[in-house]
Image (tube, rainbow, N blue to C red):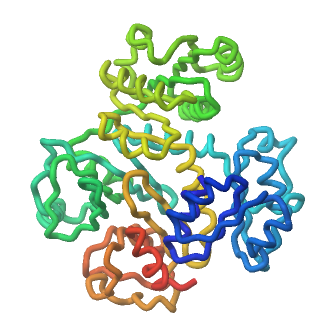
Amino acid sequence: MGYHVAERLSNEGRQVVVVDLNIDRLDYVQSHLDVGVIEGNGASPAVLERAGIAQATLFVAVTSVDEVNLVGCTAARGKPGMVKVARVSNPDFYTEVARLSPERFSVDVMINPERELAFDTLQLLQSTVATDIAAFAGGKLQLISLQVTEDAPIANRTLANVTAEIGHIPLLTAAIERDGRTLVPDGSTVVRAGDQVYVIATIDAVNKALELTGHQHTELTRVMIAGGSVEAFYLAQMLQEHKVHATLLVQDRSRAQELAEKLHKALILSGDATDVELLEAEGVGDMDAFVALTDEDQTNILSSLVAKQAGAKQVVTLVNKLQYVSLARRIGLDAAVSPRLSAANAILRQVRRGSVTRVATFKDTDAEAISFTVSPACPVAGLPLKDANFPDGTIVAAIVRGETVIVPRGDDQIEAGDTAIVFALHDAVGPVTKLFPG
């Protein structure tokens, strides 16, 4: 998780120092990222001083030990206004009785990786066919990742041709992931079957985006979850709140009993998630979705493949090893989620300041969507987008003006007071951020 956050912040041109007790891990970080490294305990004031904490504007504590992260935030003394973020997984810290006082631990933001993953999974399930999703403008806009099917209406056509056909329907293709590369398209780009397209659309236009890529929306009513993990518990809770019936397959009998006492509206079964006969007997093929959330990547992948083969309409798979995330789709799985990526993305959303109000990152592409507040000092305000000379690798995907959401074309322009949502490749994040001074 710390590696992913350091990589993203470094790519934006920030000076980053990574502190860790493991010298081998630091050697790997230093050989792959343009960052400084310090060997030592990140909760030690002396180690933090060696790392240059006095000049820092951001402190992120994401070790696997909650208490170390909290003490680190207490020990960190940086520039006035420094933002402190702590990874805190223990749900006891979030109860009303034990809720942490920010003044006591000097924590600005607490991130719970397991809850973040459950929330990301819920969003994927609600979209039914998307492999990645992010909401903007209070939910009025969605940026969704969809795979183009062989018989999709958009396949083998230029985006200019598609745009002319759909007219003023508010949706736009912000990026295409093809053969491991991310493209920011223009009107001459031809969409191919098998492409992973990132489409931004208003809520009312999402179904049109599904139709164009060869999909249709289905209601989410029944979900099967494999595993008794913390992530599985959080997701089952969220599904209950949305009146979606959840069936959990839990191998450990004592854990199954514990969950049954907490999840009164879910069906808890004791069994092996890789048992083909059990999955079929419990009707996995009739489920709207199957989610593998055990603690073992291999079990998650295998059970997901079995569920997919049995006819589950949507399959979401938890993987801890980041290299498995991009592999998931190649072996026939619909979507993969990672607690490290979910938590890292939640951290990145919180730490951006100035004109940045929201950041969304995506698993299978080297790009992110950034929401900027447009100030009077913005040099591209008042210019038609086609004349604004944005950096290569960027596209203005949407403009929010008051209560109005605009999915723009070349003649549209951003104005002071607007919120501009920009999709940018990593190399372009730094340059495009400079166009939106805080």
Q: Where is residue 87 in the image (x, y as percent from the top left)?
A: 70, 51
How many numbered markers are drawn?
0
Q: Is residue 88 above or below residue 420?
A: above
Q: Residue at x 72, y 61 (%)?
A: 39
- Quadrant location of residue 180? bottom left
Q: Is residue 249 above or below residue 127?
A: above
- Quadrant location of residue 269? top right
Q: Is residue 386 above or below residue 332?
A: below
Q: Where is residue 411 in the image (x, y as percent from the top left)?
A: 26, 81
Q: Which of 405 and 147 is in front in this view?
A: 147
Q: Can residue 252 be seen in this view?
A: yes
Q: Which residue is drawn at 81% across and 72% down?
A: 49
Q: Residue at x 47, y 88 (%)?
A: 378
Q: Nearer the viewer, residue 93 or 415?
A: 93
Quadrant the C terminus occupies: bottom right
Q: Can residue 171 be seen in this view?
A: no
Q: Residue at x 39, y 61 (%)?
A: 366
Q: Is residue 26 above or below residue 194?
A: below
- Quadrant location of residue 119? top right
Query: Seen in the image, is 112 located left or right of residue 73?
Result: left
Q: Where is residue 354 in the image (x, y as percent from the top left)?
A: 60, 78
Query: Seen in the image, is 24 located left or right of residue 314?
Result: right
- Which residue is most to the right? 104
Q: Where is residue 238 in the image (x, y as percent from the top left)?
A: 58, 35
Query: Seen in the image, is 257 located left or right of residue 328?
Result: right
Q: Nearer the viewer, residue 320 or 123?
A: 320
